[in-house]
Image: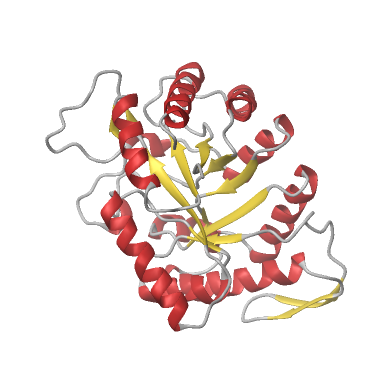
Amino acid sequence: MTTRLGLGLPQMRQYDLGKDVPDVARAAERLGYESLWVFERALFPEPATQGLYGIEGLPWPDEYRNVAEPLVTLTLAAAATERAELGSSVLVAPLHVPFQLAKALASLDAASGGRVVAGFGTGWSHDEYAAASVRPFAERGRALDELIEVCRAVWGPDPVVYDGEFTKIASAVVGPKPARPIPVLLAAGSGRARRRLVDHADGWLPNALGAEAVAEQWRQLRDLAAERGRTEPIRTVLRVNARYRKAPQDPSGRRPFHGDVDQIVEDLAAHAEIGLDEILLDFQSTARDAEELKDIAAEVYEKARANGI
C-alpha cells in the first residue's frame, strides 16, 4: 500500500498569493497529491525577543517575515480543486477566537464538499500570543482544550450549547454545518499534549526529525493509546520541511530532506517505512517561484511513486 502524499501550498513572500495558490493547488491535484496544506506564522518580531521554537539564540528564518493567513490560503485552494483534502499543519489554535474559528472551518468544509482537516498546535511564540490578545501564552494548553470542545459543539447538531471557561453559547442555531465530521489532528511533543491527542483528537501531526526519532515517537504514542484504552485508530500525517537544492548535498552531516530530488526521495522512503498514513512535503521555502515549486513537486512525486512509495 502506497503512502498518501500531500503538498504544502505557497504562502511566502516570493509568491503571488491570488495567482500562485490556485495554480499550485490545481497542478498538485493533477499530479496526484492527495492533500494540500498550510501552516501558520502570524508575525516576525524585529528585533527578536525569543529564539525560534523558544530556543535561545536560534534565529528565525527569513522566510517567516511574510506568511499568508492559512485559512485564506486554503480557501483559495478549495475554489481551485475538487478532490484534494485541505489541511493545516498547523494552525496555532489559541491565537484564534474559538467560536469564530469553528465556524470558519465548518464553512470551508461545507463549501469544499467535506475536505477540511483541522490540524492544531499550541505554538511557541510569546509575540504572537501578545499580538492576538485572545489568551495568555501560559494558558495555551487550556485554551486548546476548550477550542477543541467548542469546535465539536459548533460542528454538531443544533441547538448548540456550550458553557466553558471563556466561551459561552446559550442555546443557538449555528450554521452552516460541516459536510462531514471534521477530523482534528494535533501536533504533540510533550506528555500532556500526547494525552490530549489520545483522549480528544483524531490524529497526530509529527515533524520529520529523522526516521528513527519519528518511529520512536510513534511507538510511544501507540503505547500511550493502549494504556488509556483508546481503540480508534490514530491518523498520522508527517510534515516534511524540505530544503531542496539542484546538486546533491554532501552525505556527511546531511539533515533529513536536505538535498537534491534523489536524496529527498531516499529520505521519503525511509520515513514511509515507519507506516504513517501520509507525508506532507513542503518545498516552498527554497523554491524561487511557483514554477520551480511545481517542477520540484512533480519530480519528487513521480520518483516517489516509481520507487513504490
Specify the quadrant of the image occupied by residue 125.
Answer: bottom left
Residue 80 location (% of width, % of height): 71, 29
Residue lying at the far left of the rendered structure: 252
Instruction: Tell whether 74 sits left or right of 188.
Output: right
Q: Is residue 118 left or right of residue 90?
A: right
For the image shown, how many numbered marks are present on the structure?
A: 0
- Is residue 244 toward the left or the right of residue 203 in the image? left
Q: Is residue 164 left or right of residue 45?
A: right
Q: Residue 187 location, x and y as percent?
A: 45, 60
Residue 193 picture location, percent across and down? 43, 71
Foreground: 225 or 152?
225
Along the line of sight, the residue nearer the viewer: 88 or 231? 231
Q: Is residue 258 above or below residue 195?
A: above
Is 185 drawn above or below residue 38 in the view shown?
Answer: below
Q: Can residue 274 be spotted in the picture?
A: yes
Q: Is residue 138 visible?
A: no
Residue shown at 35% from the left, 32% from the top: 265
Q: How is the image coloured?
A: secondary structure
Residue 169 lies in quadrant: bottom right
> Residue at 55% of width from left, 42% of height from top?
37
